[in-house]
């Protein structure tokens, strides 16, 4: 089976992107795995520091590895938004395929120094591990916000991207191009959507020809996502959309089975709800009807 680097190279050649879905429990993992297997496409499972604390670092690594081995599915594991070197090293030693080292809250020069230290430490553990760095401001929190944060002041410039990649040696860059974490309530109520700076993506790709990942993809206009992929994004993160689907599915299951206390009869409603969103996003990113 191809490793993650080869999968991303194939996506670049095919003009597609690999979906990155965060999980916090077995409901979400089962829904994502089943969706990718049905469509015969690769997928990345992401777990933030909080999600790893809840699931367990070695436990999620074992689960993803077992799905890969049992079904021959190109499913990969990323340590999403890892803020400390200790947490990054823990994920690398557990067998993760990628680590997103996030020092973007620091000034750019300090971010580059910290990220370079992480790249060197993680590659010493596993030379094949892909390491991601992040620059710019896309807000925080994969949740529902009452108002949209203003991220225009923190957009990544092509020159910043070039300098950061050269200084750090990262395999993957996560720039700020109009994307933002979470969704605003109006997205749920009126269908409002986030729009991306496609020209900026193209310029960053030309200046820093590494793999690019789009964080905060939830609530982004479909046409913008397709254009972002064409402009050079190889990975698209979706988290909040899945969390909303998880909650709605769970509420539906509890409403339909108000007296049932058996988890494996109630939770399939949540699986189905998450799977519906995952299927839609996988079809879009892989240009499948």
Image: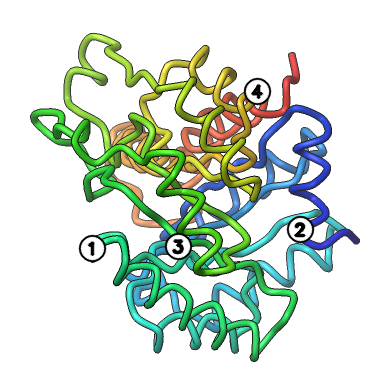
The CA span between labels 1 and 4 is: 30 Å
- Residue matched to label 4: 230
Q: Quadrant of the C terminus?
A: top right
Residue mark closest to the camera, 2 vs 3: 2
> Residue 119 appears at what percent x and percent y?
54, 77
Residue 130, image x, y percentages: 64, 67
Instruction: Indicate the quadrant where residue 115 lies.
Output: bottom left
How crowded pointer 3 is (Cα within 10 Å; few <14, some 14-19, many 20+) is rated as: many
Front-most of 132 and 35?
132
Q: CA distance from mark 2 to mark 3?
A: 17 Å
Q: CA distance from mark 2 to mark 4?
A: 19 Å
Q: Earlier in the sequence, mark 2 or mark 3?
A: 2
Q: Reading the chain from its start, which is encountered first: label 1 or label 4?
A: 1
Is residue 18 placed above or below 58 in the rendered structure?
Answer: above
Please report whichever mark, 2 or 1, sits nearer to the chain's N-terminal start: 2
At 66% from the left and 67% from the top, the residue drawn is 64
Label whose residue precedes the other's in the sequence (3 or 4): 3
Q: Is residue 190 visible?
A: yes
Q: Earlier in the sequence, mark 1 or mark 3?
A: 3
Which residue in the structure is indicated by mark 2? Answer: 5
Labelled disc at residue 80: 3
**Category of crowding for the residue at label 4, using alpha-carbon neighbours closer than 10 angstroms: few (below 14), some (14–19), many (at least 20):** some
Is 82 on the left or on the right of 213, as rendered?
Answer: left
């Amino acid at each position: 089976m191809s490793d993650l680097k080869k999968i991303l190279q194939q996506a670049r050649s095919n003009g597609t992107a690999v979906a990155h879905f965060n999980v916090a429990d077995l409901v979400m993992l089962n829904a994502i795995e089943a969706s990718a297997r049905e469509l015969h496409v690769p997928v990345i499972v992401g777990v933030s520091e909080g999600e790893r604390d809840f699931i367990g670092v070695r436990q999620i690594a074992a689960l993803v590895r077992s799905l890969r081995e049992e079904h021959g599915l190109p499913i990969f594991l990323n340590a999403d938004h890892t803020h400390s070197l200790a947490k990054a090293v823990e994920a690398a030693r557990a067998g993760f395929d990628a680590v997103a080292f996030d020092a973007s809250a620091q000034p750019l020069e300090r971010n580059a120094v910290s990220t370079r230290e992480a790249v060197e430490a993680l590659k010493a553990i596993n030379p094949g591990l892909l390491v991601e760095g992040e620059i710019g401001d896309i807000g925080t929190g994969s949740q529902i916000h009452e108002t949209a944060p203003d991220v225009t002041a923190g957009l990544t410039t092509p020159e910043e991207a070039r300098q950061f990649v050269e200084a750090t040696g990262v395999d993957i860059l996560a720039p700020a191009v109009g994307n933002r974490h979470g969704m605003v309530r109006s997205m749920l109520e009126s269908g409002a959507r986030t729009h991306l700076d496609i020209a900026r993506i193209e310029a960053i790709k030309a200046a820093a020809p590494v793999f690019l990942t789009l964080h905060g993809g939830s609530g982004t206009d479909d046409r913008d996502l397709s254009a972002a992929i064409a402009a050079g994004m190889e990975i698209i993160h979706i988290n909040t959309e899945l969390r909303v689907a998880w909650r709605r599915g769970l509420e539906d299951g509890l409403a339909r089975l108000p007296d049932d206390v058996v988890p494996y009869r109630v939770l399939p409603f949540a699986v189905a709800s998450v799977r519906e969103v995952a299927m839609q996003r996988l079809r879009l990113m892989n240009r499948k009807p």
